[in-house]
Image (cartoon, helix red, strand yellow):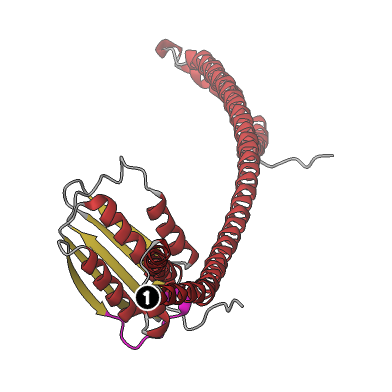
Amino acid sequence: MPKLKFTTAHRDLLIIALLMIPAFWLASSMDAFESLVDWTRQHEHQEWDELITLSVLLTLAFGLFSARRWMESIAQLKKRKKAEQSLQRAHDDLELKVQQRTDELVRANQALQKEVEEREQADLQTRKLLEENRRLGKQSMELLEAQKRVWARELHDEFGQCLTAIQIDGRIIVDETKEQPGRIRDSAEAIVSVTHRMHDAMRVMVKQLRPEALDDLGLEDAIREFVDEWQSRNSALKYELDLNVGDHPISETVAIQCYRVLQECMNNINKYAQANTVYVSLKTLMEGDEAWLELQVQDDGCGFDPKRSSYGLGLIGIRERAEALAGTVAINSHPGKGTQVIFRARIESSTIEVA
């Protein structure tokens, strides 16, 4: 059985009941109503006896007023209770919607977290693949340079010796037929001339395959010799050199790739630039604890618009060399304002040895 709650209304009713009982006992013991009737009769000429009727009417009026207020209070309580119920339902609906929305957000957050994890995993895999691709590219370049070295050595030793032998035999024939001019002497002189040109062509090919100056003199002097050779073949083109590598040890891989980049830049300048002056700079830079080698090749030629022009194989090869060495390359050019190539690579103290 539910426990009844003692309210203010219950207290007021109890007080009224406690007051009515002694009042009724006192009025009945003193004949209060009869005394009042007798008193009003004595003053009937003043109409005091109508006070009883008026009191009854006032009592009824106050009772009716109280009853109406009571009913209005009940109606207000019902409205308030109904409003509270509506508010409670709205609150429950809101809590339900909030819970549903929270569940949706939780699911969306879980899906987003999963997508982020998948993207991070994909990025990690991509970085691993790029690093592996860079390592393979570097190793491929080292293998290619090693093979070029073998070809240059074989070309110089074997083919060069054969040409020298042919040239010696030709000169012997020329000497022996000095007193007998004719087709044999002419052919021998032609053999000597051809072998001489083949020797020159072979030396050029050997230098392209493997620059001897790079092994014998080092990167800085090899670049100086390379530029001097270009200037001897094109005296109209002015060269400005700024070489300052310092005492930093440069690995064979970085040195040869830097040299190849310079070769490619000079080839492009010779073919397309129509330049008057070429500036070549080689220096080392420190960024934190890392040392960088920077090669800068700049001309004052016709230039081009990088946004509209597609890069040729030469510039693409320069970018691939930079990526394989975990370096950078910047190509700055404007029509009529020349071209600038800045190649940078980390200086290494060791490299992969290839037999």
Query: Where, by quadrant of the figure, is residue 202 drawn?
Result: bottom left
In the rendered view, does 34 fall on the left or right side of 323?
right
In the rendered view, does 225 fall on the left or right side of 205?
left
> Would you say residue 252 sits in the magenta stretch?
yes
Q: Residue at x 58, y 64 (%)?
A: 136
> Would you say residue 98 sits in the magenta stretch?
no
Q: Which residue is mark 1?
A: 292
Farthest residue, direction right: 1
Span highlighted in magenta in the image: 244-255
Q: Amino acid at mark 1?
A: Trp
Which percent across, then down, holds residue 250?
41, 81
Farthest residue, direction front: 180
Which percent across, then down, holds residue 222?
33, 77
Which percent across, then down, holds residue 29?
67, 33
| Crowd around label 1: few <14 · some 14–19 · many ≥20 (10 Å) | some
From the viewer's perspective, is residue 77 above or below residue 176? above
Residue 19, can we see it? no
Query: Where, by quadrant of the figure, is residue 346 drawn?
Result: bottom left
Farthest residue, direction bottom: 247
